[in-house]
Amino acid sequence: SLPAILKNLVIYKPSYVYVVPAIAESMYKRILKNIKKQGMEEQFNELVKKSNELRAQGIDKRREFFGFILEGFGGKLKKIVCGGAPIRPEVAKFFDDIGLDLINGYGITECSPLVCANHDMYNDFKTVGIKLPCIEWRIDHPNDEGIGEICVKGDIVMIGYYKQPELTAEVLRDGWFYTGDYGYINEKDQLIISGRKKNVIVLNNGKNVYPEEIEGYIQDIDYVNEVIVSGEKDKDGNESSLTAEVYLEEKKTPSEVLKSIKKACVELPIYKQITKVKIRDSEFPKTSSNKIKRFFKETSETVKEKTESMLETVSEKYNEYKENKESDDKKD
């Protein structure tokens, strides 16, 4: 959990940490929330502006200006290495502004696992960097925007899946490994990730929607902890609109959340706008690396386990209250 991570950072005072974007995002939100809570937004923004002006002149005062924040990471942290999923450019820039270099990269287990990364000499927050010198890459069947499936070739690519020849044949073709990720390569030969192939929502108007993009905008809402965007099916079974399922930090109605989402996503085209909101009462199920299980279906057994767990908690709290009350009555 984030509290445990922050506690360990203070205790062990590391210089480098490796995290998934979800953790970096949570840190970012927590810092901004504390700054806002203390009424320091204006002062903070002025410090960032002044710091960046000095950096442009070759003077780096970030660790001096933002020491009050860096102490919360143990005081010695210099670099955050982030991978496992795309990270929003504004989050990476925020950490850079306060004196923590956030280096983002892209990798996949089948490629041993690193494919490309930003680095100290050149760090572009909008990309996951340049490819390793030992590989080739290309975009398969790019659309009008240049977006297609990322394919990789080189010594880093696996031989195949153990005793699964059919699955191997699906992803290894003509020496190329088909990653299952969509993205494009810009004019500087840097990779920009759009999303997972299996996550793409194809609307009935033929438009492709990458939910990760919209989720990034919604994550900007300070009370949204977690979000998953999915397609909403019409009566014919076609995905015609978009729904956001959210886990919130504070109590809100669906209409209030939808209003905030429309404001956060105002610059997106109409077909990428959210039309419906679902509010969760608990966090999304996650993998061991803290990634949300996007297609996890909560079975009746799962719901039953949750309900039983909640009832146990209520029962424990009631018994605790009862014992305390009896103890107080005896004292009286």
Image (cartoon, grey):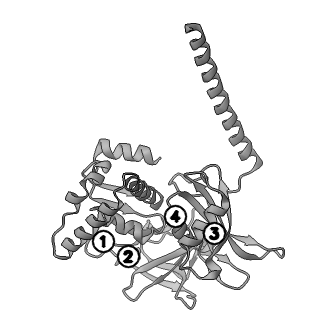
User: Disc 1 marks which amino acid?
Assistant: His
Of badges 4 and 3, the one in the foreground is 4
Q: Residue furthest bottom?
A: 144
Mark 3 — residue?
Answer: 167
How far across and down, in percent of the image, does residue 95 sit?
34, 63
- Distance (Cα) linking label 2 and label 4: 23 Å
Mark 1 — residue?
Answer: 119
Q: Is residue 245 left or right of residue 113?
A: right
- Distance (Cα) linking label 3 and label 2: 29 Å
Q: Earlier in the sequence, mark 4 or mark 3?
A: 3
**Numbered label attached to residue 328:** none
Mark 4 — residue?
Answer: 219
Tell me which residue sits at (57%, 62%) in the image. Answer: 162
Mark 2 — residue?
Answer: 129
Of badges 2 and 4, the one in the foreground is 4
User: Disc 3 marks which amino acid?
Assistant: Leu
Q: Earlier in the sequence, mark 1 or mark 3?
A: 1
